[in-house]
Image: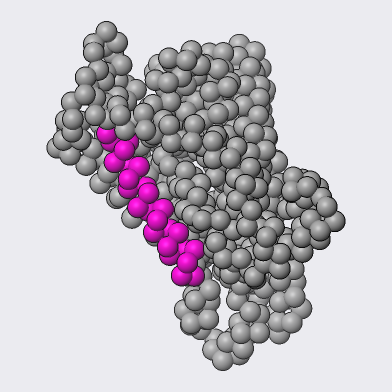
Amino acid sequence: MAVASAENTAVRQASAPAKPKRLVNAWHLVGLLAIFLFAVFPFYWMVATSLKTQAEALASPPIWVFTPNLDNYYSVLFNRDVLSSLINSVIIAVSTTVLAVGLGTPAAYALARFEFKSKEELWFWFITNRMLSPIVVALPIFIMARTLNLIDTHLVLVLVYLTFNLPIVVWICTDQFRGVPRDLDEAARLAGASRFTIFWRIALPLAMPGVAVSAIFSFIFSWNELLYALVLTRNTARTAPVAATSFMSGYDLPWGEIMATGTLIVLPVIVFALIVSKHLVQGLTMGAVK
Amino acid sequence: MSSGTQPGTPAKPAVFPTMWNNKRAAFAFLAPAVAALALIGIFPTVFALVNSFRRYNLAKPRDPTPFIGLDNYLTVLYDPSFWGALGRTFMFLVTVVPIQIALGLIIALLLHKPGLSGFKLLARLSLVIPLATAPAVAGLIGRLIFNRDFGVANAVLAFVGAGPVEWLGDTTNAFIAVALMDIWQWTPFCALVLLAGLTMVPTEIEEAARLETKSRWQIVRYVQMPFLLPSVTVILILRTADILKMFDTVFTMTRGGPGAATELVSVYIQRVGFRVFDQGVASAQAIMLLILTIVLARLYVKYVYREV
């Protein structure tokens, strides 16, 4: 199982022979602190820069000690209209996640439970979509959306994000449904429940961990996505990552504002990801360990 | 999640076969998802395929879009920029992935080693940060950190008496800088996948081995490696697919420049399609990329889902 690590480690520590080797421990500690610094530093630097004035941000050598101020946040949220981009991102990411889970879980249930011809090919087709480069779909979608007057709408991104969200939901949830015993479904069927009731009332609640993991992934991937959003939106439906790149013209870049926008995009996801980190890691490593 | 990950084979023979052999029910559950994915996945891909046989330039909306057979494909086949982008993508892959796996293994071993559980928890949680960072924002951070004048990378180099290095203005260094940001972002993924592999090693075996030998390397090589191989395969294939798709980080960090030094294949196709506006040629390139991806995905399923 992917992340039973906490429990496993506890067991291991209890049974491992206790040999207090100070030197080994010191290196272990240095290594762990190095991991922490490596992982956190670029993020820290972004946040720090977002709290600097333009002069402080462009100082050479870089300034490490300064008085933080929130001017950049005020300026991007209200003058640069990043606020409405963030709202767009929330609307799009939530809608596409709900849609992906709604469409994907019944499909995953069918792939895990039913026997039918070319089931494997179908499953494979779902997974292939996950590996598809967005650029392959972005070219034709752009022309189609232009013809249908869907450029710069929430709808087009909600739909197009299904190309990667739906495969994630199908992939993770198929695995999850397979882990739920069939006996309950079969007993319910004998008791006269309809197939949909069985799926909705019995299998789905038991598969909730997998559903949650796939929803988390759908949300994060949609929230972070740039290529489709860049190609398919202009102003009204502009998402936050597009807003962040929109400052990148001209010679003197407003680094404080750029990093403030970056922080507004990344910080909520990190807080959310830390809260659900156990599930997140479980989803990431899914399929890696069997 | 033991062994049953392959579709088609039920974990045990169905006790109630008539219930699970109902094609109509299976169809009802699958139809909405298949229809949705066909509409947004297959239909556009077919449209791209059709466009790849046409002369189609978005900058000339009045021009007709005649079918020109395989001309676009020939253009792509003889286009050194396309092969350059593909070669660069391959170079990026072979530069970045071995480093990510090696660093990831070191991190995983440090996190797996008994003791210091508080610090281990801290380190493991910190790994979530690069993973959760939007690649577009990672590119922006990279652009700031590797700035020649006020970037913190050059400040660190100055501290040890080196530099300043022209990072993003120089072809080789820009490639290295983008690679470093990718290593920052994706090493945690490799570490967590490898750590999950390490926790699969039965504790008794690991401890027996520890009594046998003091060599850390021997334990890794002979006891833990067999359990890590599936993880390594997954990393290789997912990272390959990711790098073929890679766009956001490069776009925000360098826009593929200087020149074409960091223009990976997805960035190149985006430029041809949306900045040169040649949809016909870009579609042909995208279709070729698609074929490459499908081959890779096949390999993925074959090696990861059947033989492990």
Is A194 situated above or below A18? above
Taking B198 as reference, is B58 left or right? left
- As rendered, which of B211 and A136 lies closer to the eye? A136
* Residue A234 horizontal side relative to residue B12, left or right: left
Q: Quadrant of residue B262?
A: top left
Q: Please check the rendered image and state whether residue B305 is part of the magenta-colored stretch, yes or no.
A: yes
Frontmost residue, B250 versus B167: B250
Residue A207, percent from left and from top? 73, 53
Q: State the extent of the magenta-drawn residues as a range.
A: B283-308
Quadrant position of residue B277: top left
Q: Residue at x 66, y 84 (%)?
A: B204
The prevailing secondary structure element of the residues shown in magenta is helix
At 50% from the left edge and 50% from the top edge, which residue is drawn? A122
Number of residue marks: 0
Q: Is residue B35 above or below residue A201?
A: above
Task: Estimate the x, y position of residue A184 in percent, counting from the top left.
Answer: 79, 60
Of the pair B64 and B139, the residue shown nearer to us: B64
Q: How is the image coloured?
A: one colour
Image location of residue B71, percent across then percent down? 16, 30
Q: Judge whether residue A247 is colored magenta.
A: no
Does residue B32 appear to the left or right of A152 in the view shown?
right
Image quadrant for the N terminus of chain B? bottom right
